[in-house]
């Protein structure tokens, strides 16, 4: 099975191509979208460049995996729309992958308990905790909290591992004994998304392109403002 994987939850996107035999990934390659261009403009051209380099036709792709949330509202929309469009055009299956699970996957099952975090804005985080030593296929849809940075820091315990792009700002605030993952593992990768997509398909998680929607895990600031205004009326 040939797989296209898209990861667009942050400022830059990544595109991955994977090939699996008997449920095992035997080949993978990944490319980051150009930093000087908006992901909306560069994502699909990056996909087609990578396909051309590998001499794969779009119709060779049988599964499209994409991060469906949490993450940037705009980034998630871009990735999901691109995944739906591509999958519908070539007749592929599609699957949405939890962003925080994609972050955790490279650190499991050999690490201690793992926390993955993303910026939820307003001094809050999206946070998920993954059990020590447990395989990622058992934790594909982790409970996801929206929590203040201070409250999250207070939950951390010595020996736990933390990863996520916000470590660029928060690493120095981690309590003693809490381990920051290596910087190369702070951002979710398209290849990790593809691997988790393959696991979800094996568990019956593939859906049609028309069913795929982003999961933002919270309302936008504009929606929350409107809700507050309606509550006052």
Image (spheres, rainbow, N blue to C red):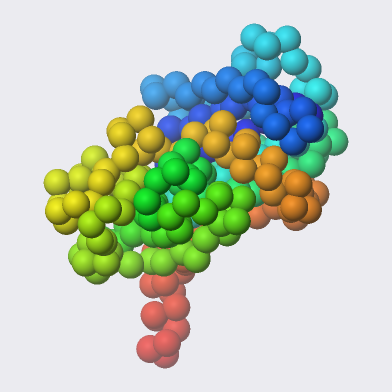
Residue farthest to the bottom? 233
- Residue 223 at x, y percent in the picture: 46, 69
* Above or below, comparing residue 233 to residue 217 in the picture: below
- Quadrant position of residue 20: top right
Q: Position of residue 44 (x, y in %)?
A: 62, 26
Residue drawn at (62%, 16%) of the image: 50
Please say whether residue 16 is visible from this viewpoint.
yes
The quarter of the rendered structure image containing the N terminus is top right
Foreground: 182 or 90? Answer: 182
Residue under the image location 75 percent in, 15 percent down:
56
Where residue 221 appears, x then y in whole percent?
39, 64
Q: Is residue 205 left or right of residue 141?
A: right
Residue 162 or residue 46, whichever sits in front: 162
Does any portion of residue 117 appear in the rendered image?
A: no
- The residue lying at 39 percent from left, 80 percent from top is 228
Give the residue drawn at x 75%, y 46%. 201
Residue 135 in the figure: left or right of residue 180: right
Residue 109 at x, y = what percent? 49, 46
Displayed quadrant of residue 181: top left
Can you tell which quarter of the image residue 41 is in?
Answer: top right
The image shows residue 231, relative to residue 143, as above or below, that is below
**Image quarter in which the C terminus is found:** bottom left
User: Left or right: where does residue 155 sit relative to residue 142?
Assistant: left
């Amino acid at each position: 099975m040939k797989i296209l994987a898209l990861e667009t939850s942050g400022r830059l996107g990544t595109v991955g191509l994977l090939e699996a035999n008997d449920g095992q990934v035997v080949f993978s390659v990944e490319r980051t979208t150009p930093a000087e261009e908006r992901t909306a403009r560069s994502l699909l051209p990056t996909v087609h460049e990578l396909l051309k380099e590998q001499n794969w036709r779009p119709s060779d792709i049988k599964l499209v995996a994409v991060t469906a949330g949490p993450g940037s509202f705009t980034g998630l929309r871009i990735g999901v729309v691109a995944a739906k469009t591509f999958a519908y055009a070539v007749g592929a299956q599609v699957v949405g992958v939890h962003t925080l699970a994609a972050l955790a996957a490279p650190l499991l099952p050999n690490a201690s308990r793992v926390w993955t975090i993303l910026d939820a804005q307003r001094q809050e985080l999206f946070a998920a905790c993954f059990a020590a030593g447990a395989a990622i296929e058992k934790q594909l849809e982790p409970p996801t909290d929206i929590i203040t940075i201070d409250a999250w820091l207070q939950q951390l315990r010595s020996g736990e591992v933390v990863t996520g792009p916000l470590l660029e700002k928060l690493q120095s605030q981690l309590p003693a004994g809490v381990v920051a993952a290596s910087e190369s593992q702070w951002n979710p990768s398209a290849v990790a998304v593809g691997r988790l997509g393959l696991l979800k398909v094996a568990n019956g998680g593939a859906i049609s392109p028309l069913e795929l929607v982003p999961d933002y895990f919270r309302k936008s600031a504009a929606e929350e403002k409107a809700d507050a205004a309606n509550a006052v009326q």
